[in-house]
Image (cartoon, grey):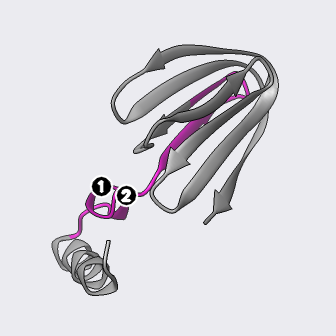
Amino acid sequence: MPPVSRKLRKWAAAILDLPQDVVLDLPRVTMIAGLQITVENHRGVVHFSSDSLRLAMDRGEMEVTGSNLVLRHIGADDCLVEGQIAGFRLHPK
């Protein structure tokens, strides 16, 4: 997204009191007790194994680490992972 467009969307989100993750297509991560994680606004799965998940994002990748990971749901822009989640990390471009 060009810088001018991003600034305009950010300004509109502030004026209209809209969540920035919706307006700017930013990732939204919801984790429940280290057992389940939901990631919204991703751009696809780069890698998946029982101890690692890498998702493409607009501005880089996100990595979820843990053990016994199971991909319960994957949609066009959201996914649900269960298992023993150790953490997650963003890798910017």
Quarter of image, res 78: top left
Q: Residues within 10 Å of mark 1 (few under 14, many from 20)?
A: few
Does 64 sit above or below residue 14? above
Does 36 sit above or below residue 27? above
Mark 1 element type: helix
Quarter of image, res 11: bottom left
Along the viewing direction, whichever of 25 and 57 lies nearer the viewer: 57
Does 87 sit above or below residue 81? below
Mark 2 element type: helix
* 24 lies left or right of 49: left
Q: How many marks?
A: 2
Magenta part of the protein: which range? 17-37
Q: Which residue is mark 1?
A: 22
Which residue is found at the position 34% from the left and 84% from the top? Answer: 3
Q: CA distance from mark 1 to mark 2?
A: 4 Å
Q: Position of residue 93 (x, y in %)?
A: 61, 66
Do tag 1 and tag 2 residues touch (Cβ < 8 Å)? yes
Q: Which residue is mark 2?
A: 21
Along the viewing direction, whichever of 38 and 70 lies nearer the viewer: 70
Q: Residues within 10 Å of mark 2 (few under 14, many from 20)?
A: few
Amino acid, disc 2:
Asp
Q: Position of residue 68 (x, y in %)?
A: 79, 13
